[in-house]
Image (spheres, rainbow, N blue to C red):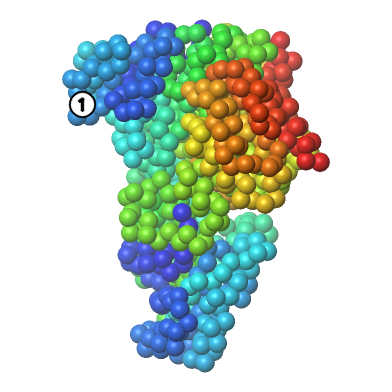
Amino acid sequence: MKIHEYQAKEVLKKFNVPIQEGYVIDSSKDIDNTIKKVQADFHTESVIVKAQIHAGGRGKGGGVKYCPTFEDAQNAANTILGMNLITHQTGPEGKMVNKILITEALDIEKEYYFAITFDRSKNSDVFIVSSEGGVDIEEVAENNPEKIIKAWIDDSTNSLDNAVKEIITSLSLEKFQNVEEMFKNLYKCYLESDCSLLEVNPLVSTTDQEIIALDAKVDIDSNALFRHPEIATYHDKSEEDPLELKATEYGLNYIKLDGNVGCMVNGAGLAMATMDIVKYCGGEPANFLDVGGAANVETIKNGFKIILSDKNVKSILINIFGGIVRCDRVANGVIEAVKELELDVVVVVRLQGTNAKLAKKILDESDIKLISAETIDEAAKKAVEMIK
Amino acid sequence: MSILLNKNTNILVQGITGSEGSFHTEQMIEYGSKVVCGVTPGKGGQKVTMKELPVFNSIHDAKKEFQIDATVIFVPPRFAAKAIMEAIQENIELIVCISEGIPIRDMVTVKNMLDKSASTLIGPNCPGVITAEESKIGITPGFICKKGSVGILSRSGTLTYEAIDQVVNVGLGITTAVGIGGDPVIGSSMIDILKHFQNDDDTKGIVMIGEIGGNMENDAARWVKENLNKPVVSFIAGQTAPKGKRMGHAGAIISEGSETAEAKIKILKECGISVANTVSEIGITMKSLIG
């Protein structure tokens, strides 16, 4: 689960990581008061106004503004709150800014990149740091890979101490007080909050010789949210695709794509393979949809509803491998759903597994417009050809 | 011969009193699996299923009365890591975890403990292991399997079934099929399972099914090139998957270039592995190699 910068900073603060302080608002009537409060509470004239959306590149897109005066801050806040922010991560349609964070402005000496994530190949956590902070880290990785330092933390004794020493040395941060403790707190935060990613970009040194997290991006392992009820409340539904959200409510796993062949499949791997074969046959998949292990009338009906909310869809390919679920039941479910929803798109069905032959007979003999197929290959070709 | 599992393997079911656990215990017994007992903490003393299998509070208690070779775990995700660790502690040789949705952090702890033990873990978030016409541990539909010469390993459940079905339909049949799971941290890697198939004389060819995310297929491809003397057919799902989107499985997300389907297919081919163009060509490709 992704969370906002201001929420990530709240999490960091609980682990005593020094952050750039500020207040978040979602209404323009609070702008003036909040700017004054930030100026007073953090002893600063200049402030920063930052759009709170789940996407990187906010600065370049005009969603982060340095404001030397109260009037500048007023203007920036009024512009950014409610704007449609387009960055390289939002896609061309952009994202509506519903919240802004107004923070103190710090006198920065140098910017660094810092992140902790999990390295699958080593079954270890890894610190990723760079002296090139505040910029797009992917660009640094491509153009100056030698400027990215990695230090792994495994379960051996002193592993964390050694990794922390390594990053302090590589960034030449020895002169700063408590820096070792801060990195350890960041790691503690990452571990104890079940983060899958904790990124601070930039981490800055100030002219007052302090190290502070100027920004924060934290992703939480959704499977671990039961341990973190307070973080679970950070979930911002407005950041998600409404169709994907609706699918989640139905217990389905759906991701919208740009094509016109809708896919309904059981199992994530088979769902991807089905999308691939649609493309191989010259079509474009409209979505990824995994209806889960037990495909029944209800899940199939809901699957149709989700797929058909996408107006680009011209045909639907249903590919179910019935293991424990019998195919004749799935076939009856498909027929019932098609009848009830009065579908007017091409529906191609391929069922394999227990009672597959009986299922095909049921589909072929039904009075509704359905195309049945025996192999995935045949089904994909039909779903693509019928709409050409 | 087969790998990991045969008709004599004594199986314990963790979470046997739950709805999934009891349903699949019946299914396993029907297939011929030698399920001897179950564990559900707090429910020791009960008898479950048609066979009146005894339920114990812990594996420790079960071991006093039964020889246990393998355990299968059907417990809710938040308790699953604890269940795996209990099995490791009790030195169970084969542990199969079906549960989906275990926090990564829990699995890292499990994996560290596992690496220092003699146990083999398959999964989590997997369909389990099936040895054709002998025994199954997990949820793979038994009726699709016929005894034969092909070993199957896969990161995806339904793609495992699809591969079994195709291999059986082209007349080859299978030795053992292993679903290793779709999570970022899993007990046994592709290489671990390939090593078992390498040592099994009945396995003449191997189907290896991967997907986007991680680098396990790439490591396995290089290992095959260096070590394996049996033909391998591979398929990688997710050629049309967009970057940065989690495609169902927690592990199926592209975060760097080498994790795309395209990159994996290239490496597999460079290592001499036959890669099926589409999911429907897995069986015939294998047939063309060992048929």
- In this rendering, the answer to whether B75 lies above or below A136 is above
Please, which residue is most extreme toward the right here? A388
Image quadrant where residue A96 sits: bottom right
- Residue at image mark 1: B43
Q: Residue at x 51, y 79 (%)?
A: A49
Q: As drawn, which residue projects farthest toward the front?
A: A367
Instruction: Give coordinates of residue A24: x percent, y percent.
Output: 42, 75
Q: Residue visible at 30% across and 16% down?
A: B49
Which residue is drawn at the image coordinates 52% and 47% (left, top)?
A247
- Crowding near pointer 1: few (<14 within 10 Å), some, many (20+)? some
Look at 54% across and 71% down and name the residue there: A97
Placement of A179 over or under B122, stated as above or below: below
Residue A125 percent location from the top left of the image: 45, 48
Number of labels in the image equals 1
> Disc 1 is attached to a residue of which chain?
B
**Foreground of the two, B238 or B27:** B27
Along the viewing direction, whichever of A297 and B130 lies nearer the viewer = A297
The front one of A354 and B261 is A354
- Closest to the observer: A169 or B150? B150
The quadrant of the picture occupied by the C terminus of chain A is top right
- Residue B89 position, x and y percent, is 29, 27
Name the amino acid type tagged 1: Lys
- Counting from the top left corner in percent of width and height, residue A304 is at 59, 42
Q: Secondary structure at mark 1?
A: loop
Identify the image quadrant of residue B209.
top right
Asked whether residue A135 is in view, the answer is: no
Q: In the figure, is residue A181 to the left or right of A64?
A: left
Residue A254 appears in the picture as rendered: yes
